[in-house]
Image: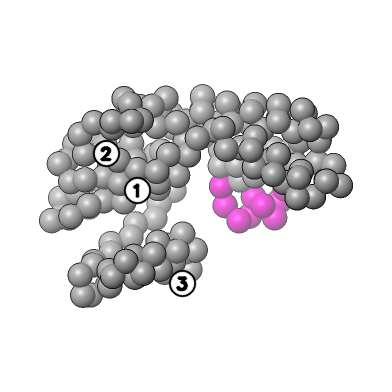
Amino acid sequence: DQHDPNLSAFLSDLRRLGWREEANLTLVPRYTQTPADLASHAQELLSRNLAALVTIGVPATRSAKEARSSVPIVFGAVLDPVGNDIVANLTQPEGNLTGIVYLEETIPKIIEVAKELSPQTKGIAHLFEPAARGTERAVGRELADASDAAGRLGLTYRAFPTSVVDDIRRN
């Protein structure tokens, strides 16, 4: 977990809640870059005797859902789970899916707060993960909302698709 800040934060919170690896918790992390790997990881993990599966992002969550298991799936960092066909309803997600929703309304608010904290700011650079399979519409809305918010505040706005560290260095 020392190499993945998201996993480190997740484990820290689990420890705070009394969960400990090798005592009452077993982690089986999987990392991938391809949809085919996501599907095979979901099948493999859901074939185990799991108490729950935690997914991050739309592609991983969709792969777990499509694997059709009764194992509870807890998702995080999912932009528009209704629009991305993860759940039919936010207030009562059906079946074995629940999670933390990333609402596109947060992007304009983040830009407003950035401007309030630093009134001399002239522009916003938005690093975003390029649209994964099925997320194109939600990512497009996110970028449009961010651009609109920046424009309303008189800020220049540039978006940079970024999926790996090398993309950040290149941009």
Q: Position of residue 11 (x, y in %)?
A: 37, 66
Which residue bears the numbered disc 2?
A: 97
Tell me what residue is drawn at x 45 percent, y 31 percent: 80
Under mark 1, the amino acid is: Thr
Q: Position of residue 156 (x, y in %)?
A: 81, 35
C-alpha separation, residue under disc 2 versus residue under disc 1: 10 Å
Tell me what residue is drawn at x 32 percent, y 66 percent: 17
State which region is magenta: 163-171
Q: Is residue 37 visible?
A: no
Tell me what residue is drawn at x 76 percent, y 43 percent: 115
Q: Is residue 71 visible?
A: yes
Comparing marks 2 and 1, which lies closer to the viewer?
Answer: 2
Q: Position of residue 54 (x, y in %)?
A: 31, 51
Q: Residues within 10 Å of mark 1 (few under 14, many from 20)?
A: many
Left or right position of 123 against 114? right
Under mark 3, the amino acid is: Gln
Which label was assigned to residue 104? Answer: none
Q: Please, is residue 19 above or below residue 152 in the view?
A: below
Left or right position of 66 against 111? left
Which residue bears the numbered disc 3?
A: 2
The first of marks 3 and 1 along the sequence is: 3
Direction front: furthest residue: 116
Q: How is the image coloured?
A: one colour
Q: Position of residue 38 (x, y in %)?
A: 34, 45
The first of marks 2 and 1 along the sequence is: 1
Under mark 2, the amino acid is: Leu
Whether tag 2 and tag 1 are in contact, CB under 8 A, the answer is no
Which residue bears the numbered disc 1?
A: 55
- Camera-side residue: 107 or 143? 107
